[in-house]
Protein backbone atom coordinates (compact mmCIF):
# COMPACT_ATOMS: atom_id res chain seq x y z
CA UNK A 1 0.00 0.00 0.00
CA UNK A 2 2.82 2.44 0.80
CA UNK A 3 4.35 2.35 -2.68
CA UNK A 4 0.96 3.16 -4.21
CA UNK A 5 0.37 6.09 -1.87
CA UNK A 6 3.90 7.39 -2.39
CA UNK A 7 3.69 7.14 -6.17
CA UNK A 8 0.39 9.03 -6.28
CA UNK A 9 0.95 11.68 -3.59
CA UNK A 10 4.70 12.31 -3.85
CA UNK A 11 5.72 11.51 -7.41
CA UNK A 12 2.66 11.92 -9.61
CA UNK A 13 0.70 14.76 -7.96
CA UNK A 14 3.64 16.24 -6.02
CA UNK A 15 1.41 17.29 -3.14
CA UNK A 16 4.11 16.64 -0.53
CA UNK A 17 7.86 16.08 -0.54
CA UNK A 18 9.49 12.69 -0.01
CA UNK A 19 10.85 13.82 3.35
CA UNK A 20 7.39 14.89 4.53
CA UNK A 21 5.97 11.57 3.34
CA UNK A 22 8.53 9.63 5.38
CA UNK A 23 7.67 11.74 8.44
CA UNK A 24 3.97 11.07 7.87
CA UNK A 25 4.62 7.33 7.74
CA UNK A 26 6.43 7.41 11.08
CA UNK A 27 3.67 9.41 12.76
CA UNK A 28 0.83 7.44 11.16
CA UNK A 29 2.25 4.12 12.27
CA UNK A 30 2.41 5.30 15.87
CA UNK A 31 -1.21 6.48 15.96
CA UNK A 32 -4.26 4.25 16.41
CA UNK A 33 -6.55 3.76 13.46
CA UNK A 34 -6.32 2.86 9.82
CA UNK A 35 -2.95 3.77 8.33
CA UNK A 36 -4.35 5.14 5.05
CA UNK A 37 -6.79 7.40 6.90
CA UNK A 38 -3.99 8.79 9.07
CA UNK A 39 -1.85 9.52 6.00
CA UNK A 40 -4.82 11.20 4.29
CA UNK A 41 -5.41 13.44 7.31
CA UNK A 42 -1.78 14.56 7.39
CA UNK A 43 -1.64 15.14 3.64
CA UNK A 44 -4.90 17.11 3.72
CA UNK A 45 -3.62 19.24 6.59
CA UNK A 46 -0.32 19.87 4.81
CA UNK A 47 -2.12 21.06 1.70
CA UNK A 48 -5.14 22.99 3.01
CA UNK A 49 -4.86 23.21 6.80
CA UNK A 50 -7.78 22.18 9.02
CA UNK A 51 -10.40 22.14 6.23
CA UNK A 52 -8.12 19.87 4.19
CA UNK A 53 -7.61 17.44 7.05
CA UNK A 54 -11.35 17.26 7.73
CA UNK A 55 -12.14 16.70 4.06
CA UNK A 56 -9.43 14.08 3.66
CA UNK A 57 -10.60 12.25 6.79
CA UNK A 58 -14.17 12.19 5.56
CA UNK A 59 -13.20 10.92 2.12
CA UNK A 60 -10.75 8.29 3.38
CA UNK A 61 -13.12 7.06 6.10
CA UNK A 62 -15.87 6.66 3.53
CA UNK A 63 -13.62 4.53 1.33
CA UNK A 64 -12.56 2.37 4.25
CA UNK A 65 -16.17 1.91 5.36
CA UNK A 66 -17.28 0.92 1.87
CA UNK A 67 -14.49 -1.62 1.47
CA UNK A 68 -15.31 -3.06 4.92
CA UNK A 69 -18.99 -3.39 4.13
CA UNK A 70 -18.11 -5.09 0.83
CA UNK A 71 -15.94 -7.61 2.67
CA UNK A 72 -18.69 -8.38 5.17
CA UNK A 73 -21.19 -8.79 2.31
CA UNK A 74 -18.88 -11.25 0.57
CA UNK A 75 -18.29 -13.15 3.83
CA UNK A 76 -22.04 -13.43 4.50
CA UNK A 77 -22.72 -14.48 0.95
CA UNK A 78 -20.00 -17.16 1.10
CA UNK A 79 -21.32 -18.43 4.42
CA UNK A 80 -24.82 -18.87 2.98
CA UNK A 81 -23.50 -21.26 0.30
CA UNK A 82 -21.78 -23.56 2.83
Image (cartoon, helix red, strand yellow):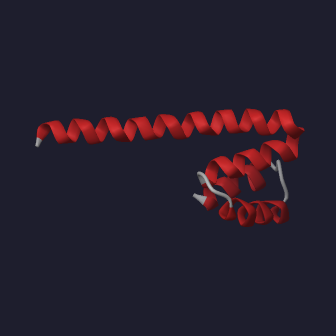
User: Which residue, as the protein is rendered here, is positioned at the far front?
Assistant: 32
Instruction: Please give the name of the residue rendered at 60% of the width and 52% of the height, measured from the top-left corner.
Output: 33
Q: In the image, what residue occupies the spot 28% across and 42% down?
A: 75
Question: Residue placed at 77% from the left, 66% from the top?
Answer: 22
Residue 78: quarter of image:
top left
Q: Identify the residue shown where x is 82% and y is 48%.
A: 15
Which quarter of the image is occupied by the N terminus?
Answer: bottom right
Quarter assignment of residue 52: top right
**Is 58 drawn above or below residue 33 in the view shown?**
above
Question: Is residue 1 found left or right of 73 in the rendered image?
Answer: right
Q: Position of residue 36 (x, y in %)?
A: 63, 51
Quadrant (top left, top right, bottom left, bottom right) of the C terminus: top left
Exactly how many numbered labels are in the figure? 0
Q: Position of residue 76 (x, y in %)?
A: 25, 37
In the image, taking residue 15 as reference, residue 34 lies left or right, namely left
Counting from the top left corner in percent of width and height, residue 14 is at: 82, 50
Amino acid sequence: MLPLIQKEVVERKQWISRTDFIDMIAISQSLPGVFAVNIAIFAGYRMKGNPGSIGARSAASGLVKRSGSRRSFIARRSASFC
